[in-house]
Amino acid sequence: MNNSFEKHEPNEAALITEMIDILRRKMERDHKKGDTRRDAHPKTVGLLRGIFEIESDLPGELGVGVFATPEIYDCWVRVSNASGKVQSDAIPDARGIAIKLMAHGGDGSARDKSLGQDFILLNTPVMPLGTVALFRDAVYYAIEISPLFLAGKLLLTGNAGVLLGLAKLRGTPSSPLDIRYWSTTPYLLGKNMAVKYSLQPTSNHRSRKQSKPGESYLGETMQAHLFSHVASFDFCVQRHQQGMAIEDAAQRWDERKSPFVKVATLHLAKQSFRTPERDALAETLSFSPGHSLPEHAPLGGLNRARSKIYEALSKFRHQRDKREDLA
């Protein structure tokens, strides 16, 4: 990996180790053995089967890694709520989507081999807690003391903008298939380019906004869509330009200076996904920024932290429940 983009924060390794310990203890408190949920995005809205189709004739600088040739990959797509606790879809929240590319030659079963490439996205272009230090403060104060104490700490340290940013993340979309997603954090593309990702909805069918959404309305709305219609997204990359932050995910990369460019299409065929088997598979699969090919390695402090935290907690979760980890 080309590390010229990155600059580690002071005490970064210690902060990450502390977060892993706090989050592991929280998982032990919150969940019974045999049903240990993820520390982040624990509620699966739906696990979808998809096809990830690479564009042909991409410019040379973009035709790298999985984008090098116009391949078609099977993939799993997990849609989730961001809250650290399982709660009603009707509660305003951020929404996530994670794509796991599968190696060629599978039969579409849960046992297919992963390509080793995940894409992790959220329905916001930035992560308000954009540094490892702020991420640690959020984990420590919100879990060990009180979320109100965290708010006070942010105000006292001149980080009121973080609170506003966190509030803006929360919403109740018509459907997860109707909204745009961003990686919020950067990744390598090849050896010398950094990019961010975005998924932009392109489906002909859109769901209606519900006046009184129910507890599972997002999954229900997605299922209603995919019973009768296909869905699709453009998968795009945004190239890093001088002055765009790598280490602070709270800073948005200006799309006027560097527009997103389409490199692939995510196709979601008609399907029935609200089944016990699919729900069980969703708990077995793990997704992480650290699941990447070398050409798409994660960059920046938040990605370094998330990769280590996700790996450690996924291992803990699956061992505690005596369940295989399908990474």
Image (cartoon, rainbow, N blue to C red):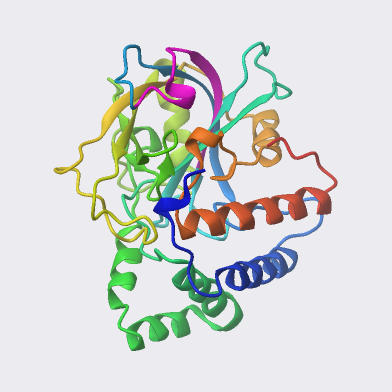
Q: Is residue 132 visible?
A: yes
Residue 72 falls inside the magenta stretch: yes
Tell which of 156 and 243 is nearer to you. 243
Region rendered in magenta: 62-79
Q: Residue at x 72, y 60 (%)?
A: 31
Q: Residue at x 39, y 38 (%)?
A: 176
Q: Residue furthest bottom?
A: 156
Number of numbered callouts drawn: 0
Q: Residue 173 vs residue 274: left or right?
A: left
- Residue 109 appears in which quarter of the rendering? top right
Residue 3 falls inside the magenta stretch: no
Quadrant location of the C terminus in the rendered image = top right
Tell which of 24 and 68 is nearer to you. 68
Residue 80 drawn at (x, y percent):
51, 44
Tell which of 214 and 150 is nearer to you. 150
Q: Is residue 90 visible?
A: no
Q: Is residue 298 above or below residue 153?
A: above
Residue 150 drawn at (x, y percent):
45, 80
Residue 132 drawn at (x, y percent):
48, 67
Q: Is residue 257 above or below residue 29?
A: above
Q: Residue at x 58, y 72 (%)?
A: 15
Residue 20 drawn at (x, y percent):
66, 65
- Residue 101 appears in which quarter of the rendering? top right
Q: Is residue 67 above or below residue 291?
A: above
Q: Is residue 162 above or below residue 308?
A: below
Q: Residue furthest right?
A: 322
